[in-house]
Amino acid sequence: MSVCGRNLSRRAFASGLTLSASIVFGAALVGIVGGGCSGPKGVPSTGPHAPTVPTQVKIYEKPPARYEILGTVTASREEGAKWDERGNANAAFETALTKAAKLGANGLLMEAPAGEFQYRANAGYHGRFYQVPTRGKPGNAVGVMEAIYVLDE
């Protein structure tokens, strides 16, 4: 059994716990399940956001604590998305950051909705590398990311 990413084995229930230990364990389980998970949480958008500028959009490898999903953005080869000799794909990131800023985003999340990507490609942005959700065949691949509005990091 897994609750909020914590594995709880049947052995814990059948290991002959004392009554007081069972009560403590049960209370902890209720706290985990009833109190909710403390992981990242995407919340419904509150509506359109005023456009930002690309320099105000931060790249997130993992979801922040609380955020709104504003939309999916892509970067394709036709838009200049390709690697340089060092593995950087600066033009692709600039394209994605610009598209996210137009949606009013202050974050660009390196995640995509299920079914929207096939694999992750390692791509750099000014020397820092990210695992970018990608679809399509090499040479014609498209990076797929989420424009987000971060409420709480």
Image (cartoon, helix red, strand yellow):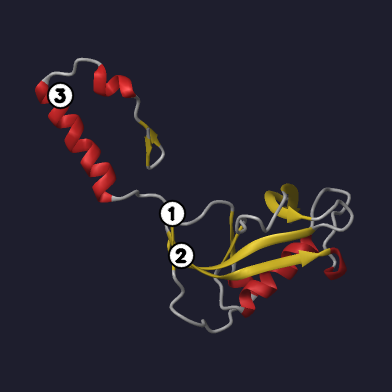
Where does the N terminus fall, quadrant-wise? Answer: top left
Q: Looking at the image, which is closer to me, 122 or 7?
A: 7
Q: Tell me if residue 117 comes above or below residue 12 in the rendering.
A: below
Residue under pointer 3: 21
- The answer to whether the residues at label 2 and label 1 have Cβ atoms under 8 Å apart is yes
Farthest residue, direction top? 16
The image position of residue 125, as x and y in percent, is 73, 56
Element on which disc 2 rests: strand
Nearer the camera: disc 1 or disc 3: 3
The image position of residue 44, as x and y in percent, is 44, 70
Farthest residue, direction left? 20
Q: Is residue 13 left or right of residue 91?
A: left
Q: Of the residues shown, which amino acid type is indicated by label 2?
A: Tyr
Numbered circle sitting on residue 40: 1
Dot 2 alpha-carbon crowd within 10 angstroms: few under 14, some 14 to 19, many 20 or more: many
Q: Of the residues shown, which amino acid type is indicated by label 3?
A: Ala
Element on which disc 1 rests: loop
